[in-house]
Amino acid sequence: MFRVRPLVPIFLCLLWFRISFGHLITCSGIVPMKYRSDTVSITDFGGVGDGKTVNTKAFREAIFRIEHLRRRGGTLLYVPPGVYLTGSFNLTSRMTLYLARGAVIRATQYHVTVLRFLISSSCRPIPVDSDDTLNWPLVAPLPSYGRGRERPGGRYMSFIHGDGLRDVVITGENGTIDGQGGIWWDMWRQGSLQFTRPNLVEFMNSRGIIISNVIFRDSPFWNIHPVYCSNVVIRYVTIVAPSDSPNTDGIDPDSSSNVCIEDSFISTGDDLVAVKSGWDEYGIAYGRPSSHITIRRVTGSSPFAGIAVGSETSGGVENVLAENIVIYNSGIGVNIKTNIGRGGFIRNITVSQVFMENVRTGIKIAGDTGDHPDNGFNPNALPYVKDVTLKNIWGVRVQQAGSIQGLKNAPFTGICLSKIHLHGKTGPRSPPWKCSDVSGAAIETFSSKEAKELEFSRRVERLAQVCGNCNYLIPITPYIPGGSSLLLVTIARYGVSTASGRQHLLKTSTNITSYFLKF
């Protein structure tokens, strides 16, 4: 059972969001909610919610009926309270899957037991048309990945799947879609997987998708994966899985455009939200970027990243806005990641109004992250990262403030850090920032770990090198010793300084403002 511990800072932060903006800004209007005049119930097709009866036939027959009758305005498939065991099934266009309060659509597990037995006894792939595995058919690998993300060859179809659809809604009264992923996680840990695990929900080549007011639990792999899609709204969802569940990303927009993710809670074993766009040479060849992605008012925890871009970014990622984010008990707050061989681009990324608590690394931008699908990747296919703005970020109990590690032959450019306040833990402290092969600006950016004059001087030198091409300022005045841990940070506009030129800057710069913070 998942319990969210009450966090006063999170409550205050959310209250601040409400006060700051007066009314909630939303992007959900890109896909209007449709009213369905035609309604059918899963029980009309023999569905039984006793937690024992397998309802795969009922779901498939209900959706077949919706697809072929083609009622004007579409049809709503109602799932009443109860636990409905089923294998994987495909949705169709112009339909709403509606889960009543207390309704659970739960993945069957018998097929996985059969898979494990056959794989261990015969060491051969399971045929797609095997009667024992019809609940989990194999599908072709995504063309932008070239193979399954975990294993060569195909991949298991997602639990709830849609390909080439229009106007589809998954919603209800906070009913649950339960992937029962535990046995899949065990297969991954034991190295007995023959193909890539299934996602919980995946839409491919689809448009006009709404997912709202549903709980997603224990996905075998990624939870919600819109790929090659446009105009997608994911709002008011709860996504949960144990923190040690492998690769259970929350929401992964992949080579998709106009995606709105808002007002959701995610606590899983991997990135809460990760924007992707294909894998190495396959993603480069497919050439479809992710663009115009909005992530707003998302709260959660993960041993990996809260908000991530990558590392699969070979088709390019651009025009991403993430704001009003709360991250706690996590590995990394904000993580932008790519690698040699990826190619593509990451540009025009803005992350703003973030609060984080008990995080290992606050901000990480790295050019050495992620594996490769095969040996066919081109090591000279370097990604370029530019115009990334991180601003108004506050953190407490952050072990390391940040790391920005570009590529020697493809430096990251236009990286702007503004009003970053990350406070560390007590005890042994790691260096607050690590920076290389990057240029940009740092404005009003510091952490409480900058407690030693030597560290502070070196930081000024580093930031002067990082920000040398920008007409912004850098911290000037060193740490003031004393029990109050008072740090004075002077921000000067239109001036750039090194440690040796601090006094000159104080005399010559214009528009100087001092900021005081007591830790």
Image (cartoon, rainbow, N blue to C red):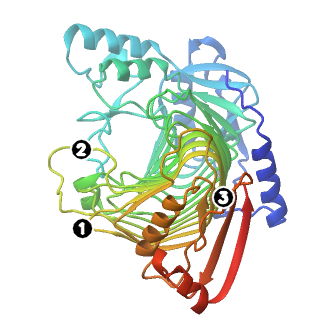
Q: Percent from the top left, x then y, of residue 93? A: 54, 48
* SS of the residue under disc 1: loop
Quarter of the picture containing the C terminus is bottom right
At x 36%, y 23%, the residue is 188
Between the residue at mark 1 and the residue at mark 3, the CA separation in whole angstroms equals 41 Å
Label 2 or label 1, whichever comes before in sequence order: 2
Tag nearer the camera, 2 or 1: 1
At x 23%, y 35%, the residue is 152
Check disc 1 and give the amino acid type: Asn
Check disc 2 and give the amino acid type: Pro
Which residue is the site of mark 1?
409
Quarter holding residue 288: bottom left
At x 58%, y 92%, the residue is 508
Quick check: can you spot residue 294?
yes
Which of these two is toward me, 400 or 91? 400
Which of these two is toward me, 343 or 91? 343
Q: Percent from the top left, x then y, of residue 492? A: 61, 82
* 460 to 200, vertically: above or below: below
Quick check: can you spot residue 333?
no
Which residue is the site of mark 3?
481
Between the residue at mark 3 and the residue at mark 2, the CA separation in whole angstroms equals 52 Å
Q: Is residue 463 left or right of residue 3?
A: left
Label 3 or label 2, whichever comes before in sequence order: 2
Quarter holding residue 177: top right
At x 67%, y 20%, the residue is 1
Which residue is the site of mark 2?
373
* SS of the residue under disc 3: loop
Labels 2 & 1 near each other (Cβ < 8 A): no
Q: Percent from the top left, x then y, of residue 336? A: 44, 56
* SS of the residue under disc 2: loop
